Image (spheres, rainbow, N blue to C red):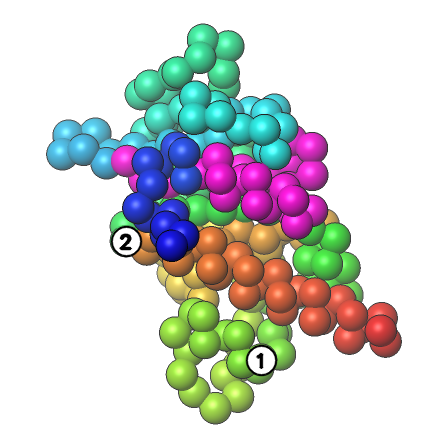
């Protein structure tokens, strides 16, 4: 019987998640980044993918343990490794949502297409009320859900700052966001939950991309 990702060693589980997402075309080349919490009682931290690593070939040592409260590197398993360029976005999520245990960011064509149809001034994308939204524990008739949209600044800490500021005031109804022309970021109270919810959001993005193209 297949194990839940939550039953595996954290870094081994993240490497397997990366392989599966790569095979689906959601983490092409070195794109995307994954993380999971690894707290102790004195210094909260999370494991995150090393920068510039091909996501279909990650090994257990291709992760760094970094701080939640600051940008410190707590543990580096390979001397040349640096934290993902988007570590600040993961840190923002963990700060705003203390119950989040995993944060997964992928790149897909469908997400870029779906969001590209939203005017540049809009900050949300209204999602169709599809059955799969129950994956976010939404048990209501025709839920009205807006996916938060953020601009794709070259300065990644700026994106992270905007996420932290906005969500600290107005948390989203689902644990997901999208950066325009870039990809989705999804978090969950476990790695398995976050993985499942990435699948849900990508299903919706694919639906919207196809519906908009008339396919």
Q: Position of residue 47 (x, y in %)?
A: 38, 32
Q: Residue at x 78, y 70 (%)?
A: 210
Q: Residue at x 50, y 19 (%)?
A: 82
Q: Is residue 141 rendered magenta in the image?
A: no
Question: Please, what secondary structure does the residue beneath circle 2 have?
Answer: loop
Q: Is residue 40 above or below residue 107?
A: above
Q: Which residue is mark 2?
A: 99
Return the residue nearer the eye: 43 or 15.
Answer: 15
Q: Which mark is residue 130?
A: 1
Is residue 26 within the magenta segment?
Answer: yes
Q: Residues within 10 Å of mark 2 (few under 14, many from 20)?
A: some
Residue 100 in percent (x, y) is at 33, 51
Q: Is residue 190 above or below residue 31?
A: below
Between disc 1 and disc 2, the foreground one is 1
**In-image side of 9 versus 40 (left or right):** right
The stretch of residues the image draws in magenta is: 14-38
Is residue 130 in sight in this rendering?
yes
């Amino acid at each position: 019987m297949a194990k839940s990702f939550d039953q595996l060693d954290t870094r081994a589980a993240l490497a397997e998640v990366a392989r599966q997402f790569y095979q689906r075309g959601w983490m092409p080349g070195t794109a995307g980044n994954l993380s999971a919490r690894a707290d102790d009682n004195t210094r909260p931290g999370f494991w995150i993918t090393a920068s510039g690593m091909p996501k279909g070939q990650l090994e257990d040592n291709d992760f760094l343990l970094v701080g939640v409260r600051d940008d410190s590197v707590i543990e580096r398993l390979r001397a040349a490794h640096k934290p993902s360029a988007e570590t600040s976005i993961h840190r923002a999520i963990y700060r705003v949502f203390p119950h989040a245990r995993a944060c997964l960011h992928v790149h897909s064509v469908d997400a870029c297409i779906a969001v590209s149809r939203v005017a540049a001034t809009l900050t949300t994308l209204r999602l169709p009320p599809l059955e799969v939204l129950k994956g976010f524990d939404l048990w209501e008739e025709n839920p009205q859900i807006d996916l938060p949209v953020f601009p794709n600044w070259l300065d990644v800490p700026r994106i992270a700052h905007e996420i932290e500021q906005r969500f600290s005031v107005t948390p989203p109804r689902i644990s997901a966001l999208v950066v325009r022309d870039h990809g989705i970021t999804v978090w969950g109270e476990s790695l398995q939950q976050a993985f499942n919810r990435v699948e849900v959001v990508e299903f919706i993005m694919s639906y919207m991309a196809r519906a908009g193209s008339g396919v």
